Image (cartoon, rainbow, N blue to C red):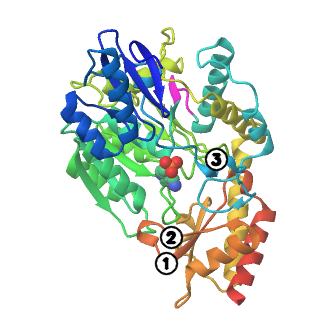
Amino acid sequence: MRTCGGVTQLHGASLLLSREGRGHLYAPGSAFHTFTGSQALRGMLRRGVTGLVRRLQKEHSACGAVTISTTRPAAGTASSRPKLKVHQPECLKQPINVPSKLLMGPGPANSPPRVHQAMLKPLLGHLHPEFIQIMDEVKEGLRYLFQTRSEVVCCVSGTGHAGMDTTMCNLLEPGDVILIAENGIWGERAADMATRHGAAVRTIKKPAGDVFSLDELEAALEQHKPAVLFLVQGESSTGALQPIEGVGLLCQKYNTLLAVDAVASLGGVPFFMDDWGVDVVYTGTQKVISAPPSMAPIAFSHRAMSKVSARQTPIHSFYSDITWLANYWGCDGVPRKYHHTGPVSSVYALREALALVCEESLESLWARHAACAQRLHEGLAALGLQLYISDPAKRVPTVTTIRVPEGMDWMKVTKYFMTKYQVEISGGLGPSAGQVWRVGLMGYNCTVDNVDRVLTIMKEALDQ
Ligand code: PMP
């Protein structure tokens, strides 16, 4: 056995020796051994590599001047690498398990086959001309959906929360006052995010299920003179529909920007960004649009972009910087630069989902949601159930909140839906937790057949 120079295998362990007689020992199952002189060798004897070290001593004494050093060999050599201690997980050797479920909760909704098929198309580079063309088509579809001619219409790669965060981090500078109309969990989240961005948060509150009148909003604008007013159009935690029309004009009067969360409502109810004077609006792909969760479509008005360009402090997040996003999405007339790798397959899916929205038309989409929601509400009443929001004008058609009758275990019902029929309806969230069931009617899932299916299963579940 050669022991001076090169690598020697001893009982499966590697000994690396330099010509000068310096060496490093790697024993199987143990990390790099450091040792010098006979003291360390004795230490190793105690640590249990006895046989190996005995042979070492023998071999090296024959070869003369052997010092076993603590100097690690150059990185990258096979013997310098640690052993793998985390092994391939067993679960990944099994096939993926994706049962087919009907998603009738407050999102995500199922996607139509055309949207799934789009995701099977080959990947393109995120700045290839063909992909840029698809992004441009998405922007056009979003302009239709938001009803805006604004230049800055794009997507944040992330879900609805990413849209909320992008709104806050671009519109707010430390110390700016933001007024948040809070009547459910999404107002609370917005207040949390705005605080993290250093804003001075003021809230106007209403009980869960209620909404704000123009007079109430005007009084709060007058009192707080905020830089931004934040409203949630469809409060999915309660099922409330906040009227937006008229608020933009008020905001302009108080030199305030109007930001609207339309994640759970856009496409299900009318929305007119330009006509209503909305400055920032965002939504999520997985609700009425019926594409998979992955992006937050967002639009900034000219006024909103002016506030961004007049900032005294940098935008805190590079990833959510609207000036970068606008450039990547080709909204600023300047050649596109790499900002991040767009989620290519998700953009294909969104493009097809928007094509379906356009084929159907917004008016027909709104009418379908209104009609299905009414059918659901009437059917629930016929089952003796009460809705959480008593005033029909305050209900968003996309999320129906149903009061859980006194003494009933809400989870038993949701479990019945899922285990017997693979249909999802969900429980409450935030202020409505434990008090309601939430049924979503969103985009592709918003059909008379699905309404009737939910009603039939609900009747069965209640009869249990
Ligand atoms: N806002 C509203 C009104 C929502 O309903 C949701 C999602 N339920 C969000 C924001 C957050 O969206 P996401 O879960 O896609 O991040």
Q: Is residue 149 left or right of residue 232?
A: right
Q: Which residue is mark 3?
A: 92
Q: Which residue is mark 2?
A: 428
Q: Residue at x 73, y 49 (%)?
A: 95
Q: Nearer the viewer, residue 342 or 88?
A: 88
Q: Amino acid at mark 1?
A: Gln
Q: Is residue 104 left or right of residue 387?
A: right
Q: What is the x, y in percent for residue 406? A: 52, 90
Q: Nearer the viewer, residue 137 or 64?
A: 64
* Mark closest to the chain's N terminus, 2 or 3: 3
Q: Residue furthest front?
A: 62
C-beta proximity under 8 Å, tags 2 and 1 = yes
Quarter that holds the C terminus: bottom right
Q: Residue at x 61, y 81 (%)?
A: 412
**Mark 3 falls on what kind of element?**
helix
Q: Is residue 176 magenta?
A: no
Q: Amino acid at mark 2?
A: Gly
Q: Nearer the viewer, residue 46 or 133?
A: 46
Q: What is the x, y in percent for residue 40? A: 22, 34
* Mark closest to the chain's N terminus, 1 or 3: 3
Badge 3: how crowded within 10 Å, few (<14), some, or many (20+)?
few
Vertically, is 387 above or below 107? Answer: below
| Residue 15 appearing in the image | yes
C-beta proximity under 8 Å, tags 2 and 3 = no
**Magenta stretch, residue numbers:** 148-154
Q: Is residue 324 left or right of residue 126?
A: left
**Mark 2 falls on what kind of element?**
loop
The image's mark for residue 435 is 1
**Mark 1 falls on what kind of element?**
loop
